[in-house]
């Protein structure tokens, strides 16, 4: 997959990431749960070439009661799930129990905002979905190479226009009024097989395409968290790998749970599923990084399977400790490791829990293009100390250093530093400064340059800015593609409030 395809896929994956975060917000704010990310990267849209074959897991987990949640966010709201008869790939596989929940919601990308906005989740239990599967519509299966997967659709009604629900009349028609006050009827639900349910009460309003008014799946009676009803300590010793993994993830979030001895046993058990053992080490590394980060980092060594190395690196990026940052820097610098593993470490140095862009400077010049691209793309802020070094790179005479400096400064909109470079009136510093300023949005440069925008500089930049008007230009910039892949919510305290919709125009 190339960078352009990565960018397109990242836009698609962002819907799922934002949807899972919206479900977490709803569970916490309305129903008192303590939701955390269960499947790593369920709330992220970074695209990696090395695919990690994890345990198939639900997206979210309540660290208090153990509730598991799958979030399904689509541009068109419906009760739809993918299914395969391949063992472990069914729509309700992956550890979803009868009492666990599915959240369905619409994601709206039409406004052009990124990441996209999401509507209120609609909730259904696994048991209710299972009870009505006989009445679902199934699509034709896809290719056998793709698991002969089908799409299962539970009949429901999602109005395409907004309005107010009024009730059901004597002729078994749903009565509603649109936003203009006109009385409307929906009678097609007569053709649904199975038991029919209404999800709104008379007087409830609904937005266009954002609410399921009626369907065949029974709605849950209550979504309120029952409190600390889950015995995490016992779960750590259970025979089910998914339950043990859930318990390990919960101990990372709920520090008051005293299960340290059992957690250590899981982390050091050679017979344990490697994913469960890894998560135990992550939980312990958050508490004692000096002891556990080295063991966690060892999982990224050259003599392990690449998927295990990748997962170890991604886990390290979640540990907010200087030891984890040091380990990531060491991994990123090791030529013996696979490019994906090194690139993931570089990405974590700039985008992880212990982010420090200054530590990325050596990786920006790495001879492996994938590592260098990710290091450059991961820099989201240029400190004054970095700007001094980057300014020196512009005039170093080393074309690779100068190009890297120009890109980092332009991407972070350090117009001030680039103007300083231009005003030095020295070659090649001046040329690289012009090149970098010409690659930025004209409006940004003009507004920040103000009086420093001389006629001579304007004459040099305006031909380059014609790029913004050139309809033949294509969006193949690998760094712009990486900008789109920065949707990531805190796995232990997810919230839509953390979302960044103020990306550069290139995103």
Image (tube, rainbow, N blue to C red):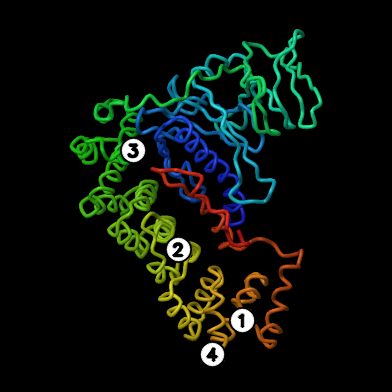
Residue 419 pos. (x, y %): 57, 82
Front label number (2 vs 1): 1
N-terminal label among 2 and 4: 2
N-terminal label among 2 and 1: 2
Q: Split into 4 quadrants, where in the image is the C terminus?
A: bottom right
Q: Which residue is mark 2?
A: 371
Q: Which residue is mark 3?
A: 249
On residue 287, the disc is none
N-terminal label among 3 and 2: 3
On residue 434, the disc is 1
Residue 415 pos. (x, y %): 56, 76
State left or right for residue 416 relative to residue 343: right
N-terminal label among 1 and 4: 4
Q: Residues within 10 Å of mark 3 (few under 14, many from 20)?
A: many
Q: Which residue is mark 4?
A: 424
Front label number (3 vs 2): 3
Which type of secondary structure does the marked residue at label 1 adopt? helix
Residue nearer the viewer, 307 or 493: 493
Q: How far is the residue under mark 2 from the one under mark 4?
A: 32 Å
Q: Residues within 10 Å of mark 4 (few under 14, many from 20)?
A: few
Q: How far is the residue under mark 1 from the one under mark 4?
A: 12 Å
N-terminal label among 3 and 1: 3
């Amino acid at each position: 997959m190339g960078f352009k395809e990565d960018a397109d896929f990242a836009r698609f994956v962002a819907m799922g990431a934002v949807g899972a975060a919206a479900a977490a917000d709803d569970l916490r704010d309305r129903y008192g749960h303590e939701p955390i990310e269960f499947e790593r990267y369920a709330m992220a849209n970074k695209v990696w070439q090395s695919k990690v074959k994890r345990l198939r897991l639900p997206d979210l987990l309540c660290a208090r009661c153990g509730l598991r949640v799958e979030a399904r966010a689509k541009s068109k709201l419906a009760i739809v799930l993918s299914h395969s008869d391949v063992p472990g790939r069914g729509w309700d596989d992956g550890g979803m129990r009868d009492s666990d929940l599915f959240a369905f919601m619409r994601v709206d990308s039409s406004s052009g905002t990124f990441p996209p906005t999401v509507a209120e989740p609609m909730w259904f239990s696994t048991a209710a979905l299972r009870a009505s599967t006989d009445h679902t519509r199934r699509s034709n299966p896809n290719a056998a190479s793709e698991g002969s997967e089908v799409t299962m659709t539970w009949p429901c009604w999602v109005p395409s226009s907004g309005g107010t629900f009024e009730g059901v009349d004597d002729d078994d028609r749903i009565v509603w009024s649109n936003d203009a006050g006109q009385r409307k009827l929906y009678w097609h639900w007569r053709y649904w097989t199975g038991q029919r349910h209404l999800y709104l009460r008379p007087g409830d309003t609904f937005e266009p395409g954002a609410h399921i008014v009626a369907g065949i799946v029974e709605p849950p009676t209550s979504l309120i968290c029952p409190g600390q009803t889950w015995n995490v300590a016992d779960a750590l010793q259970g025979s089910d790998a998914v339950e043990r993994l859930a318990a390990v993830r919960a101990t990372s979030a709920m520090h008051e749970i005293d299960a340290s001895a059992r957690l250590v046993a899981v982390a050091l058990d050679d017979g344990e599923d490697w994913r469960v053992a890894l998560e135990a080490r992550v939980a312990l590394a958050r508490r004692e990084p000096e002891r556990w980060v080295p063991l966690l980092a060892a999982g990224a060594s050259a003599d392990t399977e690449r998927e295990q190395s990748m997962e170890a690196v991604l886990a390290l990026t979640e540990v907010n400790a200087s030891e984890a940052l040091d380990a990531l820097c060491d991994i990123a610098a090791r030529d013996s490791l696979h490019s994906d593993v090194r690139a993931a470490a570089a990405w974590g140095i700039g985008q992880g829990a212990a982010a420090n862009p200054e530590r990325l400077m050596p990786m920006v010049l790495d001879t492996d293009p994938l590592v260098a691209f990710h290091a450059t793309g991961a820099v989201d802020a240029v400190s004054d100390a970095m700007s001094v070094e980057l300014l020196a790179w512009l005039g170093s005479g080393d074309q690779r250093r100068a190009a890297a400096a120009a890109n980092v400064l332009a991407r972070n909109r350090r117009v001030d530093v680039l103007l300083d470079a231009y005003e030095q009136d020295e070659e090649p510093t001046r040329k690289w400064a012009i090149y970098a300023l010409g690659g930025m949005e004209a409006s940004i440069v003009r507004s920040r340059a103000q009086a420093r925008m001389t006629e001579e500089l304007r004459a040099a930049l305006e031909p380059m800015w014609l790029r913004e008007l050139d309809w033949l230009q294509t969006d193949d910039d690998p760094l712009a593609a990486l900008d789109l892949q920065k949707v990531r919510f805190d796995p232990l305290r997810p919230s839509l409030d953390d979302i960044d919709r103020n990306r550069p125009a290139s995103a």
